Amino acid sequence: MIKVYNTLTEKKEEFIPFEKNRIKMYVCGPTVYDDAHIGHARSAVVFDVIRRWFEHRGYSVIFVRNYTDVDDKIIKRANEKGVPWKEISEKYIKSFEEDMAALNVKEPTFKPKVTEHIPEIIKMVKGLIEKGHAYEADGDVYFAVETFPEYGKLSKRKIDELMAGARIAPAEKKRNPLDFALWKKSKEGEPAWDSPWGKGRPGWHIECSAMSMKYLGEMMDIHGGGLDLIFPHHENEIAQSESYTGKPFVKYWMHNGFVMVNSEKMSKSLGNFFTIKEILKDFSPDVLRFFLVSTHYRSPIDFSFERLKEAKAAFDRIKNFLNAKSVIKNVQEEGKGGAPVDVEKYRKAFNEAMDDDFNTAKALGILFEMIKEINILKDSIVKKQKATTEEKESILAAVSFVREVMKILGFKLEEEKSTNNLEDELIKLLIDIRQQLRKEKKFKLADEIRDRLKQMGIVLEDLPGGTVYRKGE
Ligand code: ZN
């Protein structure tokens, strides 16, 4: 049984998805106006490990991560540089994808961009107006917070208390200071789309509701993101989604902790941030991943180059351990019994730690305990220059266990290029070709691709947002 900490209930709960072996998961992605920093890396790696653990436990995961590719910050950056806004967003989507590939973060099943989902967003805004949850004011559309009495249930804030501190800025035309923009009227020279309210662009929060519903349906199992997104972003997502569908939007809300520098949150505005590209000049992606997963995902993590060096030393201990086989290779095998290590005991403890709200910190601690025990055994074998069959076998079992779990946690280890990615790419290529054939009404050939893949244990499934695949029956 997997337990998940749910921000909504503030409790660890048994994880039970809506469909038996299928998980629908949405994680808020970046606003693409600059290179990604360690804060982005943490969120990406945390939810990558969670996804990988679910998959290891036999679930097939539909994973959606969006790109906010139209936003005030992008427009501002474009104006500063004197280039079209689209150039900025495209450049930094590419940069982000380079970082994700370097960090071995699995490709999402879908990576929707806001600018490619304007009709879906307009449909939802229209629906909210029709249901009386939103209103137009001179080309802007706002969500009326007082129409959703549960507002504040995720962030545990009360509407009255929020009201006391809120003010309406002079340029805003909203009725209530807590109301938030669903649609913004565009100013001269800004990106704009036609809408029933004139030329404009979406507000930030509505995109995640509209896109998650398109790819995952009206109710999903997991919605994740950084702690700083709880309020107002996720609170607003709940308000607009549940007002629109009348159904609970998300079963489990999951949030990762901050990255701290000298006890302050790492952020663009404080200027105390390091980009992923900067870090990867001096440290390998595996070391950065190791640094990020050696703290539990909900706890804050202190970033410094000193701590990265410590992470490198610890990670090297694991890598060196994988060579243990060579040490015992030429040792004479003699006798029975001896002092083998109980690898299964460690495996069980590792699994329990991971099943308990993805406690990677504890799980890695268990790995090091076992490595310590094996190293003592190894040293005594080297000294005696002989080992029993059981002793040798336990060392081999320990090495293959460590290799296996490091892969599950997303480490590349010594392999330069993951063959896994090549396989993914080839299957996606076949899916694209099949899609093209279906468009051209060549159904026989399209079906043959599907059937042949099925024989190989790869099942294609046509969903509203596109075709996904899973391995299994
Ligand atoms: Zn979001």
Image (cartoon, rainbow, N blue to C red):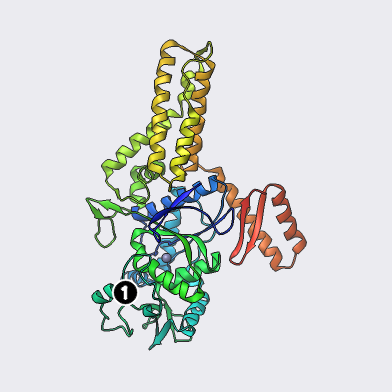
Q: Is residue 284 visible?
A: no
Q: Position of residue 395 (x, y in %)?
A: 49, 24
Of 302 and 95, which appears nearest the observer? 302
Q: Position of residue 353 (x, y in %)?
A: 43, 41
Amino acid type at mark 1:
Ile
- Please tell me which residue is depicted at 39% across the width and 21% down the height of the picture: 376
- Please tell me which residue is depicted at 44% across the width and 45% down the height of the picture: 356
Q: Is residue 257 above or below residue 314?
A: below
Of 201 and 98, which appears nearest the observer? 201
| Residue at the extreme left of the image, as rendered | 262
Label count reads 1
Q: Is residue 304 above or below residue 379?
A: below
Q: Is residue 411 visible?
A: yes
Q: Position of residue 88 (x, y in %)?
A: 40, 66
Q: Position of residue 358 (x, y in %)?
A: 43, 47
User: Please, what secondary structure does the residue beneath circle 1 have?
Assistant: helix
Left or right of residue 81, residue 123 in this image: right
Quickly name the residue at label 1.
Answer: 159
- Please tell me which residue is depicted at 52% across the width and 79% down the height of the picture: 123
Image quarter of residue 153 = bottom left
